[in-house]
Amino acid sequence: MNTRKVYNRKKSIEKNNKLKSENKLKLLKLIPAFLLLIPWTLIVHIETLRSKLENQPWYPNLEWNDDFFLWDRSWGLVGIGILMLAVLLITKYKDMKQNNNCCISFRQDWPLYIYGILAVCSSFLSPNRLFAIEGMTEQYETIWVLLTYLIIFFYFRIIFRDEKLRIWIFYFILIEAAIQTAIGLSQLIGRDFWSSPIGIKLITFGTQSDKNLEFIFSESGQGSVYLSFYHPNYAAVYLIIIIPLIVAAVRLAEKKWQKIVCTILVIGMLACLWGTGSKTGLFTLFVMIILAITKYVGEKRKLIIMLVCFLGSVMLYVFIGYFIPQDTMLEKTVKNAFPTKQEQMLTEVTTGKDVKIVYNGKELHLSVEEENGKAYFQIADKNGQTLPLDYDKDTKRFSLHGEKTSNLKFYAYREDGTCHLEMDLGEIPWYFQKGKDDETYDYITLYGKKDNILNAVHVFPDGWGSALSGRWYIWSRTIPLITKNILLGSGANTFALNFPQNDYVARTNISSEMLLTIISKAHSFYLQTIVQTGLLSMMVLIVFMISLLRRIRKTGCQGNYEIFLSIIGYLLMGLTNDSMVVTAPFFWAILGLGAGISFCKN
């Protein structure tokens, strides 16, 4: 009898120990997801970093830059990725020890293996590999971050095939969504949390900085919603990914109070989406609503609901545009989508023995001639005939005779034995310097550095460069780069070094703001991927996405269609937005979650 009691007690202890061990393992599995979905998203901290671009002629003379959103989050993500990899290895070891082989096939993931190999080869074989490895100002999506995205995918795919663990992901997402919505609403009413005393203390924690911080985005206006994601556009990307999942929580919640709380959260997130000012975000939301209607609404009611949604959206935009006299979102949308064609007054600038310009169809040759120790400025036509000039004593500027009202003005002077020539096109100055040895002219950028002027190859007609907030111009000059990056790309984080930054003539015709802008992003996930990791890598990713979306849509697992909509939403947002370290991890996590449930049968 005593022997039986001892045996039962021993068995009970072993059972309890096994249960504790399993609980510890489950906790370990959840820690990386918790870190990624809640604390990591709230990292906003000032870091003063080397720009590594100060020697580039098109970049300001800034050796150091302040970073708030990207550097800490980039390396923090890599750290979480290493923890995820450790969890995957421990899980695999436990499964092998218990002869618990995973029944899920990984053959469908072959495109990701190819993508990873191409990304590594593109980065480490790149002449700009330093930026691919260490990051670049305003980017920091290094090769290590790209590889971490793949780890995130497999972590969520493997670990959360367990439904008991998967429910925790939705809890984490709900908590984070509530925090971000609270931050967004503070920004919407003009009381930005990150500009508050508490927010500034968090941002400057551990530093000597005592800066008064205020994040203003000229594209969207002061007070725009950016949450904790660097820019309103990236906040919109985050909201588009998360909103369908919160809607799933509303649909699947068992208790009434849970449905009410989640519904309030959805409304708050929609308000934040509106506050971002993202036109692509609102368009994507509309597409997602239409897709949801086709899934959940009966056939007879679909057409009516779609019609009501469409007419309601149009009426809302018209109402806002009519009753609010300021520069409204409606007006901005129309201006960006259908801008007035800009006249291309300046079509050519070439330096050599003189400075040749073609302005308003006229070919002019500018030069500074030296005689008896003095410098004389002159302009000749294409036949070499010197043209008469007028001189304004007040502005000390020359203009072509009889064209004092023209936007084209000139100024020349001699300093330290070097002749300098300045051409003012409206508010935009062009500087040239005559070499002492070879007697040829060099273009001097607005940052005081010599550079060559390039008329970049483009695919779209000129005159519409300001369309889509300047994306028309950027895409027009990016698409020709595809032919140089078919098999391999230029490497992670290197778009700015491959884009024709010295396309000064075309940028001048758009605006002074475009001339001063450092174009560090393709403003398209697809073009960015093609340039940095190659056309082949983008093709295999598209093949993978299509295959996975089909599997997710067919699965019988609850919440599958909302995950499907999240992925579709991100891919649509990717048409006009880049992959960024602040938002892409959510996409890869949801992608992994979708891949995990794609094998569920019920």
Image: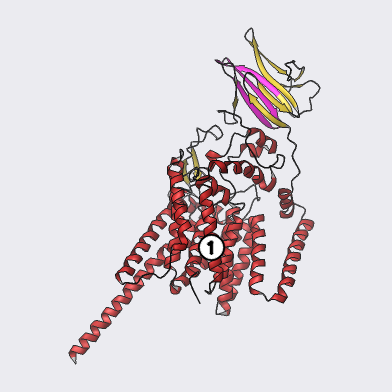
Q: Quadrant of residue 470?
A: top right
What count of labels does the image hold?
Answer: 1
Is residue 205 visible to us here? no
Q: Residue at x 43, y 63 (%)?
A: 106
Q: Position of residue 127 (x, y in %)?
A: 46, 38
Q: What segment is highlighted magenta in the picture?
A: 410-438
Q: Is residue 322 above or below residue 416?
A: below
In the shown orientation, is residue 430 left or right of residue 580?
right
Q: Is residue 382 magenta?
A: no
Looking at the picture, tell me which residue is in the foreground, 93 or 144.
Answer: 93
* Residue placed under numbered mark 1 in the picture: 547
Query: Which amino acid, by three-letter code, is at mark 1?
Result: Ser
Helix, strand or loop at label 1? It is helix
Q: Residue at x 41, y 62 (%)?
A: 32
Q: Is residue 300 above or below residue 432?
A: below
Looking at the picture, tell me which residue is in the foreground, 178 or 339.
Answer: 339
Screen quadrant of the N terminus: bottom left
In the shown orientation, is residue 331 left or right of residue 514?
right
Task: Specify the color scheme.
Answer: secondary structure
Q: Main secondary structure of the magenta part?
A: strand
Looking at the picture, tell me which residue is in the foreground, 180 or 475.
Answer: 475
Q: Position of residue 128 (x, y in %)?
A: 46, 39
Q: Residue at x 61, y 30 (%)?
A: 453
Q: Residue furthest right?
A: 402
Q: Quadrant of residue 508?
A: top right
Q: Position of residue 449 (x, y in %)?
A: 55, 28
Q: Position of residue 149 (x, y in %)?
A: 46, 56
Q: Is residue 423 magenta?
A: yes
